[in-house]
Amino acid sequence: MNSVAEQPVTAADKTFYRLRDDIVEGVIAAGSKLSEADLAARYQVSRAVIREAISRLESCYLVERRPNVGAKVVHLSKAGLSQLYQVRQALEGMAARLAAENMTAIEIDELSALLSSHFKTVKSGETYYQEAGDLDFHYRIILGSKNAQLIRLLINGMYHLIRMYRVQLGMAGPRVTTAFDEHRNIALAIANRDAELAEMLMRRHIQYTEHNLLTKLID
Amino acid sequence: MNSVAEQPVTAADKTFYRLRDDIVEGVIAAGSKLSEADLAARYQVSRAVIREAISRLESCYLVERRPNVGAKVVHLSKAGLSQLYQVRQALEGMAARLAAENMTAIEIDELSALLSSHFKTVKSGETYYQEAGDLDFHYRIILGSKNAQLIRLLINGMYHLIRMYRVQLGMAGPRVTTAFDEHRNIALAIANRDAELAEMLMRRHIQYTEHNLLTKLID
DNA sequence: AACCGTTAAATTGTCGACAATCAAACCATT
DNA sequence: AATGGTTTGATTGTCGACAATTTAACGGTT
C-alpha cells in the first residue's frame, strides 16, 4: 500500500530500518548518544553492521557523527525546524509544480482516489491512518515530479527528519481536517495542470504545518 | 584560502577525499565499477575503510550501490544533468535570496574583495584559478544563507556531482568572462540587500551554465 | 582549592578471516 | 542452436580481535 516499499535484504538494511524507526518515534531519545557496543548487543548484530547503519543514518540527517568520538541523535530545536521547513517548502513546492506538469493522467486519478479513501478515515477519526495518509499524499506528488535528484533529496534524505519532528511533537488538533482540504485543493490544481497554483498551495500548506509545529517547541 | 577547509583525521577520511577527487576528476571513469579489493590494494588500506569511504560517496550521489552486487560510479547523462541543475537552480536561488538577507556587512565586503582578486586572474587567463574561484564564490553565498540544512544539502551533498559534470565536460570558451560579470551583478544585488533580484540573477546564472554544459553531452 | 600533567578505562577505528550471495561459465537436454 | 539448471569463481557481507584515540579520573604542585 505504501508508495515507497523498502524491503531489507541485508542485515545492515534491517538494522538501519529498525534504528531509524526507533529514532523517528523517539524510542531512542533525541540528543542521546549512540554507543556502538550497546546497539550491537541490543540488536544482536556485530559492530560492523551497526557502523554501517549509523553511517546511513548520518546521510539522512538523523544522527551527527564526530571522528573518534561517536554519534549522537540529532537535537530537535526551533531553529532546526525553521531551517528544515524553509528548505522543504522550496523543494516540495517545486515538486508540486513539476508534478502538475509531469504526472500521468492515471497517476492523477490514483491521487484523487487516495484522497477519497482518506476522507472516510478522517471522518472516523483514526489518527494513525491520518499520519500514514498524509505521508502517502506527499510521497506521490514528490514521485510525480519525475525528477530523480529531487526525489532522492526529499524521500531518502529529508523526510525522515521531517517525520521525526512531526511524530515527536505530535500533530493533532483542528489542524487535521483543514489539512485534508488543503490536500484536496493541491490535487485539484495538479489535475488542472495549474503548475503555478500547485506550487503556491503546497508552499502554504507546508508553512501552515510549520507554524503548527513551532507552537509545540519551547526551545 | 578555500572556504570549506576539510581536514582528514581518520584513514577513512583520507581515502574518502582521495577517492572522491579521483572520481570527480575522471581518474576513475564515470560508470565504472568500484571493486573493494582493487581499491584496498590501490590505496593501501583495508577493505573496511574502503567500504566506509564508498558509503560516504554514495551519500553525495557520486556512486550507486546495490546490495550483494557492488558500487558503480554514477553515469553522466543529459537527463541527469538537467534534473540536477533544476534542483540546483531552486536551492542556490534560495541561498542567494537568504544571503542578501542574512550576510553580515563584513562577509559582503569579503565577497567583493574576492571578486576583485578574481578579476586579475580572469584577465591573466589562468583557467585553474577560475575554476577554484567560481567554486569559492558560490560557496560563500551558500554559507551566507545561514541555513544549516541548505548548506549541507548543497556543499556536502550536491556540489561534488556538480563539480564532476563541470570538470569532465570542461568549462572553457567565452563563457568564462561573461560568468564573471554575472557574479559581479549577483554580489551587487546582495550588497544592496535586494533579495529578490539576487535570487533571480543566481537562477539565470545557473541556467546559463547548464545550457553551456548541455551542448557538450551527446547522450 | 584550583590548575596541570599523567594515567587508566572506555570507545571508536582498523584489520584479516570466514560466511553468504551473486554472476558467469559450463553442461545437459530439447 | 537455444534453453534451463548446476557448478564454480569471484565479490560482497559479517564477524571478532587488536590498535589508536579520546575522555575522565587521579595525583601532585602551586
Image (cartoon, coloured by chain):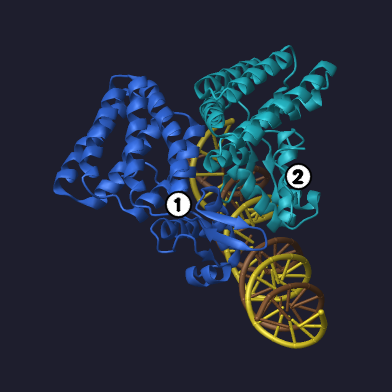
Chain colours: A blue, B cyan, C brown, D yellow
Label ID, residue A77 = 1
Q: Residue at x 32, y 34 (%)?
A: A205
Image spot of residue C1 (x, y percent): 65, 81
Task: In the rendered view, tell whether residue D20 sits above or below residue B149.
Answer: below
Q: Few, some or many C-alpha atoms within 10 Å of disc 1 (few <14, some 14-19, many ≥20)? A: few
Q: Residue at x 76, y 44 (%)?
A: B18
Q: Quadrant of the C terminus of chain B?
A: top right
Q: Quadrant of the N terminus of chain B?
A: top right
Q: Chain of mark 1?
A: A
State which quadrant residue D21 falls in: bottom right
Pointers 2 and 1 in contact (CB under 8 A)? no
Q: Which residue has dot 2 on it? A: B18
Camera-side residue: A47 or A33?
A33
Q: Residue at x 73, y 22 (%)?
A: B170
Residue B168 can be seen, yes or no: no
Q: In the image, what residue type sits under mark 1?
A: Ser
